[in-house]
Image: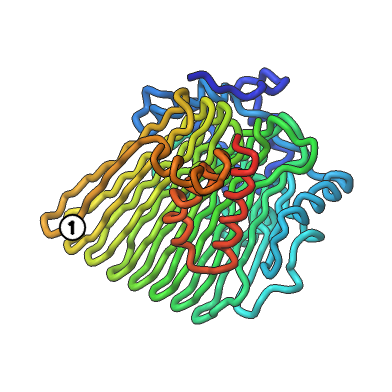
Amino acid sequence: MNVALTKPTTEQPFSELFVAARGRLPGAGPVAELRQGAFDDFARLGLPHRRIEEWKYTDLRALLREIAPLAPAPDQAALARAAKAVKSLGIEGTQKLVLVDGAFAPQLSDMAGLESGVHVRVLHEILEDSSNKARADLLRTGVASDAMISLNAALATDGVVIDVAEGAALTMPIHIVHVATNSATSLVTRSLLKVEKNARVSLVESFVAAEGAKSYQTHDSVVIWIGDGAELQHVRLMEDALDAANISTGIFTIGAKARLNTFNLTNGGSVSRYQGFITFAGEGSEVVTNGVNLLGANRHGDTTLVVDHAVPNCSSREVFRAVLDGRAHSVFQGRIIVRPDAQKTDGKMMTRALLLSDEAEADNKPELEIFADDVTCGHGATTGALDESLLFYLRARGLSENDAQSLLIAAFVGEAIESIVNDDLRDLAIATAERWLATRG
């Protein structure tokens, strides 16, 4: 199956791309050195391709072809268009932090309305602060040798750095909104969240396009530390323009007796990949990670999750659903790693795909790597079509063909969406899914 974005007008090789981007990259000294090293790694590896096992179903050399030049800093016209896009989300009761074309937009953000216990700094300001000896560490990851993670470290223009104080229990979710206003350019952002001991917080990430933004690329990373006894509810909603690309990474490190509930929904973009790396760093912790791909036409969506049980007595649950119409292609790769000392691990995953078209394709690849002997682990995967008997039953009771299908699809993805604990965020995910059902591709 061939899916490709409209190629950017520039034909710059990788080295020229980095030279052209330097004017937009904050940070000198050790920050610039780290960027150069990261870009050298990316240039050496190149865009991931199918001969790399982790990327065998998402060949960016064929799907993406090249990296678009960085988007310019937003002007007043771009900010006005971004404001309309943020308003159209219809999300109230959150603490919004808005990034426009890869730059933090304070005039669109709720910096004055942050709850007590939340401290927000802007990434580019920290990177440019020569008195901060650890500033370059904000661009490090070390979780995996991956070309797209290296690219993000090299070209990240901005983001937010959030600290939630020990014991804080936030009543409003923190909401990072990514807005694209330009066409045929790249938005490269990196955000960091530290949830201190015994804190409680919800984080929402939204990816949207302003009117007229086309064929852009989003390259985002979010790095999250969850302290001992802390709890994070994380919801990620990707609704980029239908001819855009979104390549994003989430990196989670979880302390002892902590809780992480994370949910990702993809229903936009021509090419997308969300890769999550979750590492247990303390005993007695729990992770619930769920996802839904809603894809039509010839769109390609990849969800790749690696859950690393590095310590004993932790549990993880993964539930993933894909609904595919037209010539869409969904990929799910889920790997559970159980280290030799991680006894009493309880890890399970289940992925299911629903094909609404004979031309749709789903690749499901669950994996277990177990190096301990006292564990409970399992995985499963299924692919199928809508149940014709159920469709007949619903139509016999007066529903149209489309309404009957929509009802069954909503029930199919409901198990994953129902995992969202926060009622408002669950309703937000349901509304996003309903918009897709109304248009179906």
Residue at image x 59%, y 59%? Answer: 204
Q: Name the residue nearer the viewer: 200 or 128.
A: 200
- Place residue 19 in its image quadrant: top right
How packed mark 1 is, by other alpha carbons closer than 10 Å (few <14, some 14-19, many 20 or more), is few
Image quarter of the C terminus: top right
| 98 displayed left or right of 147 | right
| 34 displayed left or right of 306 | right
Q: Name the residue nearer the viewer: 198 or 4.
A: 4
Q: Residue furthest right?
A: 77
SS under mark 1: strand
Examine the rendered structure and indicate whether residue 269 appears above or below residue 338.
above
In this rendering, the count of numbered labels is 1
Mark 1, residue position:
376
Q: Position of residue 101 (x, y in %)?
A: 73, 44
Q: Name the residue nearer the viewer: 404 or 4.
A: 404
Residue at image x 40%, y 23%? Answer: 50
Residue at image x 88%, y 48%? Answer: 76
Examine the rendered structure and indicate whether residue 323 appears above or below residue 45.
below
Q: Position of residue 86 (x, y in %)?
A: 75, 54
Q: Position of residue 123 (x, y in %)?
A: 65, 56
- Place residue 68 in its image quadrant: top right
Examine the rendered structure and indicate whether residue 174 appears above or below residue 176.
below
Q: Does residue 33 appear anywhere in the picture? A: no
The structure's colour scheme is rainbow
| 158 displayed left or right of 354 | right
Q: Position of residue 205 (x, y in %)?
A: 60, 55
| 329 displayed left or right of 52 | right
Callout 1 amino acid: Thr
Q: Does residue 386 appear anywhere in the picture? A: yes
